Image (cartoon, rainbow, N blue to C red):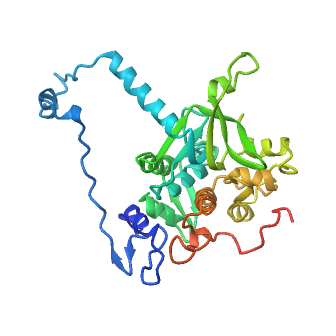
Amino acid sequence: MAACAASRCAVNVGAFVNTESSKLSFGASSVNGVRIAAAPRPAVVSQETTGPRAALYSDAQYDLNNYKFAPIKEAIVAREMTRRYMTDMITHADTDVVVVGAGSAGLCCAYELSKNPNVKVAIVEQSVSPGGGAWLGGQLFSAMVVRKPAHRFLDELEVPYDEMEDYVVIKHAALFTSTVMSKLLARPNVKLFNAVAAEDLIIKEGRVGGVVTNWALVAQNHNTQSCMDPNVMEAKVVVSSCGHDGPFGATGVKRLKSVGMIDSVPGMKCLDMNTAEDAIVRFTREVVPGMIVTGMEVAEIDGSPRMGPTFGAMMVSGQKAAHLALKALGLPNEIDGNFVSGVHTELVLASAEDETSATA
């Protein structure tokens, strides 16, 4: 397997380049055949790590029999957590893109968006543990099957796999999920708000303009408690990747139906992997102004088949949703072909049919 060691560097270079002389492929590690070396990461040194006390611990021997931590006041821990979290809440009270749901599609969408450092991305996930169903394969088995050509995204992430003729197998699904999550959350323009539920949508003049948020435990207990008003998060674009299972499954499109912005949510049909994965990618779209639907929530709104334990469509649907969001923001994107030179094969899992209904 060819690992793309410099993919992050290459994509960041190419995200804002659109000339005939610069042929930079989506997730590639070279320009015009010349390999791009990964840029060295500078050491982050804060004022607190340069004093005389810090020197005592920087040179300490790793002796597990006499190990001693640097002293700290409990109040300092509380202040650090609170200050940083509240700063993030203030920053993302008015953000560019809110991704609702941190399953495989939502994470891939946020990862793709984060390549543009000027796009602020907030991820809202009701579970304490993001990742959705992508920590395991089917029926709680370990391996993750990804149909080609979606394996190119794994190359970009440098996730190892066993290669077969038409698909690849990751030995444990957690390898993919932990990798995309760690790369995503390391980027300064992204914040994950886990244990936070999107209870409702902000809708003004027929356009989705953000989400109504609350602590997940509060959102799940409104029938037993009162006086627990929510918070809000305004956004230029909302990406709904709520999946199809659980208490918050497909809540984005269900809410649109309840307010009359879409006609129906028929739910997904019975399993058909070959039909389902193509349909999920093809019908990932902006369903109403300001709101894009991705992942298995697409099957819920279109009545396309469920796809079972294959994950390629989740990855590519998330990527497509990101580029639809970039398009909505008026930024370079794959949909218009001005993000890089041409559309990539992993974004063309589906045939080039008209975006009518999956049930047509």
Snapshot quadrant of residue 349: bottom right
In this view, the residue farthest toward the front is 205
The N terminus: image quadrant: bottom left
Left or right side of 51 for 355: right
Asked if one can make out residue 249 in the rendered structure from this viewpoint, the answer is no
Location of residue 326 in the rendering, given as x and y in whole percent from the top left corner: 58, 60
Number of marks in the image? 0
Left or right side of 44 for 207: right
| Residue in the foreground of this view, choosing between 311 and 120 | 120
| Residue in the foreground of this view, choosing between 6 and 328 | 328
The C terminus: image quadrant: bottom right
Snapshot quadrant of residue 155: bottom left
Location of residue 214 in the rendering, given as x and y in whole percent from the top left corner: 63, 29
Left or right side of 60 for 223: right
| Residue in the foreground of this view, choosing between 257 and 63 | 257
Location of residue 125 in the rendering, given as x and y in whole percent from the top left corner: 59, 38
Left or right side of 259 for 243: left
Look at 76% across and 73% down and name the residue there: 353
Snapshot quadrant of residue 202: top right
Rendered position, 100 above or below 157: above
Location of residue 61 in the rendering, given as x and y in whole percent from the top left corner: 13, 31
Rendered position, 71 above or below 128: above
Asked if one can make out residue 215 in the rendered structure from this viewpoint, the answer is yes
Look at 44% across and 45% down and name the residue there: 185
Rendered position, 329 above or below 74: below
| Residue in the foreground of this view, choosing between 249 and 112 | 112
